[in-house]
Image: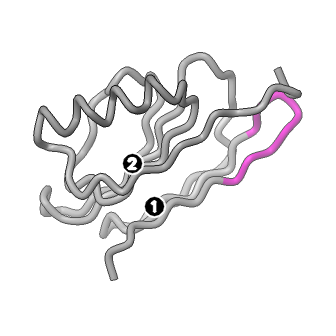
Amino acid sequence: MANQKLRIVSFNVNGILNPVKRSKILSKMKKEKAQVVYLQETHTKLRKMGFTNIFFSSYKSKHKRGVAVLLSNKITFEQTYVQKDKEGRFILENIRRDRDHLTERIRSSWK
């Protein structure tokens, strides 16, 4: 598995509460066969969305900021480090996949 390439996609969703918008994003993720998904400006805490492993950072007010990393249940990994801020602006993860290391850093576009 270490030699296989990961399918990584990133979306600035500008809120994901609307069911129609959420459905379109999910369809796009499936079409792209995404294994790792970065979402910025989620504006909410996320539910499963078809992914077993979800890491997110969100602000106290549910309708501001928010970032998430979704990892497919089809990839095996070990999370070796995670750091989030309390304001929902970023999440930083170190992930080991077989012998490979992947550092993921996702930051909201909010300033």
Residue corresponding to mark 2? 56
Marks 1, 2: nearer the viewer: 2
- Assign the magenta stretch its main secondary structure: strand
Residue at 27%, 52% in the rendered image:
42
Give whichever of 27, 107 is nearer the camera: 27
Instruction: Report crowding for label 1: few under 14, some 14 to 19, many 20 or more residues within 10 A (C-alpha).
Output: some
Task: Give residue 27's quadrant in the image.
Answer: top left
Residue 40 position in % (x across, y down): 37, 57
Q: CA distance from mark 1 to mark 2?
A: 8 Å
CB contact under 8 Å: marks 1 and 2: yes
Residue 107 position in % (x across, y down): 46, 66
Magenta segment, which residues? 96-103
Q: Indicate how the structure is coloured in the image.
A: one colour
Q: Earlier in the sequence, mark 1 or mark 2?
A: 2
In this rendering, position of residue 64 left or right of residue 12: left
Q: Quadrant of the N terminus?
A: top right
In this rendering, position of residue 50 left or right of residue 24: right
Instruction: Report crowding for label 2: few under 14, some 14 to 19, many 20 or more residues within 10 A (C-alpha).
Output: many
Is 99 colored magenta in this rendering? yes
Instruction: Say which element carries label 1.
Output: strand
Residue 53 position in % (x across, y down): 47, 29
Reply above or below: 88 against 69: below
Q: Quadrant of the C terminus?
A: bottom left
Give the amino acid type for the residue marked by disc 1 in the picture.
Lys
Residue at 13%, 63% in the rendered image:
61
Number of dots carrying numbers:
2
Residue corresponding to mark 1? 84
Task: Give residue 101's quadrant in the image.
Answer: top right
Residue 57 position in % (x across, y down): 36, 55
Give the amino acid type for the residue marked by disc 2 in the picture.
Phe
